[in-house]
Image: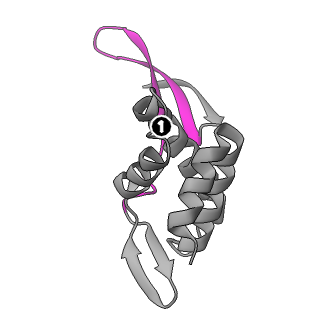
Amino acid sequence: MVVNSRHQKRNNCVWRRRKCEACGAVFTTNESPDLLKGLSVKQGKHLEPFSRDKLFLSIHDSLKHRKTAQSDATGLTDTIISRLYPHITDGSVDAQGITAKAANVLKRFDKAASVHYLAFHVH
């Protein structure tokens, strides 16, 4: 049974305190929608499924000059995705919007990585 519940705007999730009716144990859950499952990327008139892995690999490739490229790319990918949520309309996001958000996040973190990213993603 849910004892307490709060919406967490920053993490786009719901925090809930639950109590087991059988044993009385109290525990906490953080619940968030998996918005990426049905998300599509618009490229002109074409749609393709959104791939977190594809975004991660492109960010990682731009950060390969850093010793901590993998952990940095993981965190930056999560940041980019969280900033895309407000721009999702009708279950899709524009490919240029993804590129712009990624470049902006990278620019604040590592300018060289941002330049590398844009060199391969701006047409």
Tell me the amino acid under the disc marked 1: His
Q: Quadrant of the N terminus?
A: top left
Considering depth in this image, is 72 or 66 the residue closer to the camera? 66
Residue wearing tag 1: 65
State the extent of the magenta-drawn residues as a range: 12-37
Residue at x 38% of width, y 51% of height: 57
Assess whether residue 21 is covered by the magenta stretch: yes
Q: Quadrant of the C terminus?
A: bottom right
Tag 1, which secondary structure? loop
Residue 51 at what x, y percent from top left?
A: 37, 60
The outermost residue toward the bottom is 45
Image: 69 above or below 49:
above
Image: 73 above or below 71:
below
Residue at x 49% of width, y 41% of height: 63
Q: Quadrant of residue 8?
A: top right
Considering depth in this image, is 59 or 120 the residue closer to the camera? 120
Considering depth in this image, is 29 or 105 the residue closer to the camera? 105
Image: 21 above or below 103:
above
Q: Quadrant of residue 18?
A: top left
Circle 1 Cα neighbour tier, 10 Å, few/some/many (<14 / 14–19 / ≥20):
few
Residue at x 63% of width, y 55% of height: 103
